[in-house]
Image: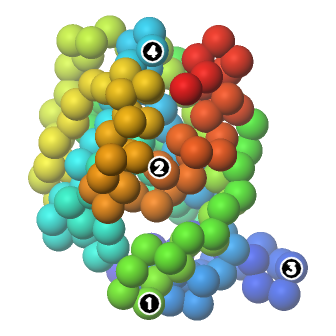
Amino acid sequence: MATLIPAWIDDELTPVEKLEVHRRGLRHKAVSVFVMDGDRLLIQQRAASKYHTPNLWANTCCTHPDWMEHGAACATRRLREELGIEGLVLFPRPGIEYRADVGGGLVEHEVVEIFTADAPADLPHDLNPDEVQAVRWVALNDLRAEIAAAPERFTPWLRIYMAEHAEAIFGADMRV
């Protein structure tokens, strides 16, 4: 069964199949989660089988809500489904909109609800191999340096978040 996500067609929010949204570059809803341990971010390496941006490093969790699903519920669900992480308190941050070519003729034009969560470095997790092949903690300053040195290793949206929206996501006290 195709996954229907909220996308705008002629300024009206409409359920559209996820792959079709990306093929057409439609503006659509998304959710991104940033799990933090102090100034360190838990990042994930996307599974090799993902239909776009396989093997690239991304923020903790990035996804699309199902049609009529609230952003916080989606974030909680996908943390569990992708990473086996449960029980975190999510804090909403200012929303972000971006457009990025993700390869293979696909475009992400996302209106993103952003959430952060605090967690200990020994946070239990159970990776879903269909979604995520690895996770690691990285200090925000080190992440920025890694992206500068090898941007091709990171998803376009993580590069955009770190370059253009770090203060909005992490707060003034966590500028990178």
Mark 4 in CB contact with mark 2 (< 8 angstroms): no
> Colour mode?
rainbow
How many residues crowd around disc 4 within 10 Å: few (fewer than 14), some, or many (20 or more)?
Answer: some
**The residue under label 4 is which amino acid type?**
Asp
- The residue singled out by tag 4 in the image is 39
Q: Name which of mark 3 and mark 4 comes first in the sequence.
A: 3
**The residue under label 3 is which amino acid type?**
Asp
Q: Name which of mark 1 and mark 2 comes first in the sequence.
A: 1
**The C terminus - image quarter:** top right
How many residues crowd around disc 3 within 10 Å: few (fewer than 14), some, or many (20 or more)?
Answer: few
For residue 68, what is the image quadrant? bottom right
Q: Name which of mark 1 and mark 3 comes first in the sequence.
A: 3
Q: Position of residue 69 (x, y in %)?
A: 61, 54
* Left or right relative to 39: residue 176: right
Mark sitting on residue 105: 1
Q: Secondary structure at mark 1?
A: loop
Whole-number angstrom distance, CA of label 4 to CA of label 1:
35 Å
Q: Secondary structure at mark 3?
A: loop
